[in-house]
Image: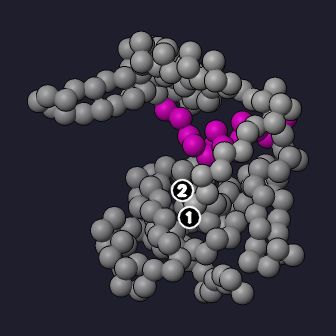
Amino acid sequence: MSDELIDVSGEWAKRAYVDDAKYKAMYEASVKDPAGFWAEHARRVDWIKPFSPGAVRDVDYTGNVHIRWFHDGTLNVSANCIDRHLAKRADQTAILWEGDDPAKSKHITYRELHAEVCRMANALKQLGVRKGDRVTVYLPMIPEAAYAMLACTRIGAIHSVVFGGFSPDSLANRIVDCDSNIVITADEGLRGG
């Protein structure tokens, strides 16, 4: 690994959301008032049911040990990654995928991503997958891996991603350990030619 430090160009620095001064100010705010800081930043995503002001942070390190954030609010990762961008960015690239053969690369728009994720979510629901079920994703580095993960979050299923190069025994152990209801896989995966 190189120790070379590459400076950010002036053009990129002007477009940055956070510069050094803003980073330091944000850090200080997060230390001074963690609940207030995270409540402010949590409003940057779309909530199905907004959290109440007193539910931003609930932490107890003694007795009934627990750490809960925004515990009375409800949001959906899939909706925040895809749906909220459809009105203004439907035809913009959401995922830039490069295949094993660079000639087989794709620019997947938010509209295409939405359609594929909804299709995958409906297929999972047809197979009986419901909120709280565990789904193992055992796929190569293909767009369908992202579709599967986002489909799981859309319906409230928990996904466990297993590296596609694991042995059958390693895969079996992970399926059993998470009490998976279903495995999403492919019949082959190409890598490095």
Residue behind mark 1:
124
Q: How many angstroms separate mark 1 from mark 2 (CA)? A: 8 Å
- Residue at 61% in and 57% down: 2
Residue behind mark 2:
152
Residue 92, given in percent of the width and then of the height, sits at: 86, 46
Q: Is residue 126 visible?
A: yes
Residue mark closest to the camera, 1 vs 2: 2
Q: Is residue 131 left or right of residue 24?
A: left
Residue type of the residue flagged with mark 2: Cys
Residue 122, given in percent of the width and then of the height, sits at: 62, 60
Query: Does the magenta-highlighted stretch encompass residue 75?
Result: yes
Residue type of the residue flagged with mark 1: Leu
Labels 1 & 2 near each other (Cβ < 8 A): yes
Residue 151, given in percent of the width and then of the height, sits at: 60, 56
- Residue at 82% in and 74% down: 102
Of residues 150 and 26, which is closer to you in this image? 26
* The residue stretch that appears in magenta: 74-88
